[in-house]
Amino acid sequence: MSAAAQDCEISLTIAKAAQKEELPSQVQEILGNRLAAAVAAQGGVANSNFTPFFITAKANTLYKETLSGPPVSTALTVQLTLYIGDAVGQKVFSTLTVDAKGVGTNINRAYINAFRAINGKNVKMQEFIREGKEKIISWYNSNYRQILIKAQKSASMHEYDAALYYVTSIPECCVGYEEASKLIDTYYTQYVNYNCQLIMQYARSEWAKSPDAEGASRAFDWLVFIEPGSSCEGEAKALYNEIKQKVTSDWDFENREKYKDEAGLKKQRIEAARAIGVAFGNGQQPVTTNITWLH
C-alpha cells in the first residue's frame, strides 16, 4: 500500500447490495460490522454516515444443508463478493470474491459464522481495501476543484451546512486538502453568524420556559455556540448578564478558560464544522442505501 493510502483516513458508507436471497436484518448488521472492522484495520472509516463512496457485499448462497445433529444445525457455503465504489458515479473501484463456510444452530448463526471470512488481516482483503482507497484518493485529487466550486456556490446561497459538507469531505492526504481546510473556518464563521439569530431564539426560549438554574444551564448550552466576534455576540452577552442577575453560575469562568487556548478553540471549530457537514450529508442520503446496479 502506498504511504498516501496507508496513512489516509478515507470514509466509506456501508451500503446494502441487492441480494438474490434477502438476508435477515441481524445478519445484514453483522455483515456491515465485519466490513467496518476490515476497513478500520486499514486506517479507514466505514459507517452509516453518507459519503459518495461505499463498501458493500453481495452474498450468494451456493450450498445449504440441515445437519441432523444433535444438535440440529445448518451448514452453508456462501460466495461473498465485496465492492468498494462510487455510488453517485455508479463505478466500482475494487472487488474481491470470497468463498465462506459457516455452521450454526440456525440459519442466522450459520451466516454469521460464514462472515468471519471477512477478516482485515487477510492479505487479499488488505489488497482489496488498498486498491479502493487509492482510487478514491485519485478521484479526490482529480475532482477537488469541482468540490470547492460547489462549496463556494453553496456559501453564496447561504447554504453553509452544504459548503461545510463539501470542504470537510476532502481527505487530509489529498492535494486539495490544504486549500479546503482554509475554507473550513471561513464557512463555519459564516454559518454561525447566519444561524446565530436562531441560536439566540432557542437560548431565550429555554430561559423563558425555566427562569431558574436548570433553564440557565440549557440556555448556556445554546449560548456557547455564539462565537466570540460573531454578529450575535452582543445579544448573547446581554442575555447572559440578564441570567446572571438571577442565577449564580460559573459558566463565564469555564468558557474564559476554554477560549484561552487558541489551538483548542480552532480544533473545536473544525470538529463542529465537520459535525455540521456530516449532518448535512446524512440529510442528503437516500431513504434506502441499497446498491441495485451492481452485477
Image (cartoon, rainbow, N blue to C red):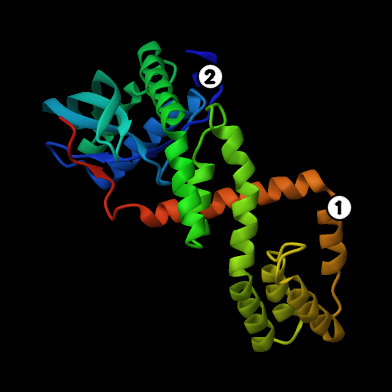
Could you tell me which residue is drawn at 85 percent across and 68 percent down?
252
* Label 1 environment density (alpha carbons within 10 Å; few <14, some 14–19, many ≥20): few
Residue 145 x %, y %: 46, 36
* Label 2 environment density (alpha carbons within 10 Å; few <14, some 14–19, many ≥20): some
**224 lies above or below 120:** below
Residue 138 x %, y %: 42, 24
Residue 98 x %, y %: 25, 19
Where is the C terminus found, in terms of image quarters?
top left
Whether residue 186 sits left or right of residue 62 in the image: it is right
Query: Which residue matches tag 1?
Result: 260
Q: Amino acid at mark 1?
A: Lys
Assign a secondary structure to mark 1: helix
Residue 231 x %, y %: 70, 69
Instruction: Find residue 253 and report its image quarter.
Output: bottom right
Q: Earlier in the sequence, mark 1 or mark 2?
A: 2
Could you tell me which residue is drawn at 44 percent across and 47 percent down?
150
Q: How many marks?
A: 2
Instruction: Find residue 115 and report its image quarter.
Output: top left
Q: Are marks 1 and 2 in contact (CB under 8 Å)?
A: no
Could you tell me which residue is drawn at 79 percent across and 82 percent down?
243
Query: Which residue matches tag 2?
Result: 4
